[in-house]
Amino acid sequence: MKRQILVATGLCALTCLASPAVAQSVGTDAEAEAQPPSEGDIVVTARKREETAQRIPISIGVVTDAALTRTGSSSLLQLEAVAPGINLAKAPTGAEIGVTVRGLGSAPGSPSFDNSVSLFVDGVYAPRSREFASSMFDIGRIEVIKGTQAALLGKNTSLGAINVVTRKPGREFSLDLRGSYEFEYGSTLVTGGVDIPLGETLAVRLSGQTLNDKGWVRDGITGRRSPRNRDDAIRAVLVWEPTPDIDITLVGQHDYSVQRGSSVEFATLNPVAELLAGLAGAPGSLDNQLDNRNATYLTTPGSEQVERLKVDRFSATVNVGVGEGTITSVTAYSRYTDANLTDIDFLPGNWGTRGIDETSKQFSQELRYVSPSGRTVDYLVGGLYLHNELDSQGLFDARYPFGPPGLPNIDGAFQNEFVQKTDTFSAFAQLTVNATDQLRLTGGLRYTSEKKNVDLARLVVRPGLYSLGIFPPYAPFSDSRTDSPIDYSGGVQYDVTPDIMLYASYGKGTKSGGFASSATFLDQSEYSSETARTIEAGVKAQDAGRRWLFNLSLFSTRVDNFQVVTFNGQTFNIFNTDLKSTGFELEASWRPVDGLRLFINNTYADAKDRLTGTAIPLAPKWSGTGGFSFRQNLSDSLVFMADGSIDYRSSRTYQQDPAASVIGNAFTTYNLSVAFGDANDRWEARLIGRNLSDKRAVAFSFPTPIIGTQSVMSERPRTIALQLSFKF
């Protein structure tokens, strides 16, 4: 413990020195910083061309594989640790993930919602929030594209996007392996891959990851820690270049995870909760201290909730040179199945349970033509077809020994049935006019036609107040809706010098309406399309030697008909509201001497509901990170490395009505990793400490169903892991 305190103290001192300065991207690794300036720029493909992040007239964050390695990250749920400005939260029941950027995005609660901040894997749209729970391994880079987009991505997004670019095979045989052991809780991680050349034009990369996360909340009934997660994933990537003008990339990935136990704790208690715990044979087992302890079981003592999530993704990308331009075809199929059994009262005893069996299947085909770069007019045109099927079957059971005054006990069981089919057609184009050597004008346009057909039903399994009154039955019925928005964007860039750019842009993006699978009243499950309009202006500057960087963007986003699903403790309500977010993003870095980089990356977003004036979920006003990266050669063959950061966010809410649940307090963590490695990058031994001061904070909060208390999930406490990496 003394050593941990000394480490935290040293980190505080070093990071205080770093506070005035910042980095182009948290993912810029020490090796890239040491390269010649022309090779140190980060290349992205957010606009379907290879460009440096500093040349794109939008705010974009880039996370490299080196950043993921330095932090030991293994899941998209840990993206907050390496991509400042992103806020994520996981619901207590199933892998339902909420994601916001600049304070705007979808909260967890309804898996049938398309996310406002969309996920793309190798440019392929992944619409459901559950897919954020999949493994993050063998990554080339992650691009966090902020603000409203019209024609940049395969599907229009209203509030931003996260594009995960997987690692491709090299031209020589190589093998890499990384393993870690976490000392506080005994969690383990093993990940690696191998490049296998099969000829001069053909190569394959095989990679995989196995994670055994032991959890951090102790259950006083079962004696186990929760949530325990076993996640195994494998991927194969094949690249074939039969001619200089043709390349084909095939990707196949399988991910299977099993999560056991509940991490939910009580923030408030009342006599009802104490009574139920006593009736279950566990009197005095509850507390509301946010102490990483709870007391719960499902069905019988010793049993616990469980979720099994399986995700499969397959894609084929074909690039064909035509003249000096390129035709690209992206064909993809994905499928996930999720089966979870959840204790919805989070108490000892069999009072309330929810079982979900859900399947999503999607096929997409994108075709586009990208003109050669550097002409007076650069352009791309394309089209997309997407078909998605979502089938969700839920069984809800309540056995509470009480009810409202004058009414029967809250008892009964029902089955919820939801089947939705989505067909999307879109055509898009983007144009860049290089008016002069310094001035560029851009414009984008997308037309989308999206139709959703839904079949809904709610059947009584066991009669009672719960299945007849609170959640009334519905005979099977069907509904449909069609949205046909036209989205657009425009912007201007001006190069003050080759390394200093000013830009301004305006964009309109739409997310189509649909139907919520979690609505209490199925005939009110429809919600309208969501439209966002963003204006942004900024500067991107760096010196020719890449020793310093300064990026600043100002933004204002207004959202009409933002799609909301919210839980008030009894029912799920679906509606639309209007939002706004205004603020700025700052990222900068400085290398005062060779081998040392200081950085800060900060987002300020004043995000509010325009109708009520209240704060909106997952929207802290301040969030970001500041820290340092240090690299020093100790000899011709040995290198010492150290990376530290202070990550922070201000308070945030978790429900549409801020008074409905506990407000999350401000959360600041001190993080440090130190490593010794081979100068040729063949091996590395790294000690990684996260949240070294063991800060306690709320990660998500909600009103507990039926019993009238408030429940919370906590942030992960201090972890210290030893990580070993090898390359051959």
Image: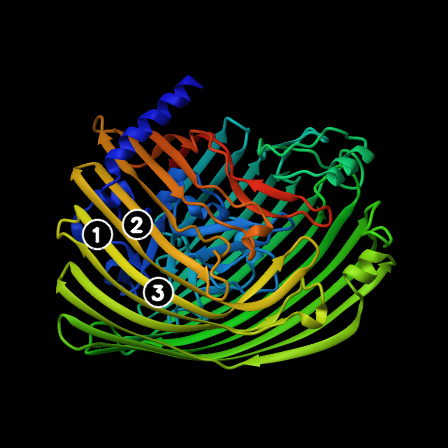
Residue 556, numbered label: 3
Up-down relation of residue 364 to residue 302 (above or below): below
Dot 2 or dot 1: first in sequence order is: 2
Of residues 191 and 662, the one drawn nearer to the viewer in this rendering: 662
Q: Compute the Cα span from label 3 to label 2.
A: 22 Å
Q: Residue at x 17, y 68 (%)?
A: 494
Q: Amino acid at mark 3?
A: Ser
- Mark 3 vs 1: CB contact within 8 A: no
Q: Residue furthest top?
A: 2
Tell me if I can see residue 62 in this picture.
yes
Q: Compute the Cα span from label 2 to label 1.
A: 11 Å
Up-down relation of residue 435 to residue 570 (above or below): below
Of residues 616 and 480, the one drawn nearer to the viewer in this rendering: 616
Dot 3 or dot 2: first in sequence order is: 2
Q: Amino acid at mark 1?
A: Phe
Count neighbours of disc 1 (C-alpha within 10 A) and say few if under 14, some if 14 to 19, many if 20 or more: many
Query: Which residue was labeled with disc 2?
Result: 25
- Quadrant assignment, res 521: bottom right
Query: Which residue was labeled with disc 1?
Result: 550
Left or right of 143 on screen, residue 386: right
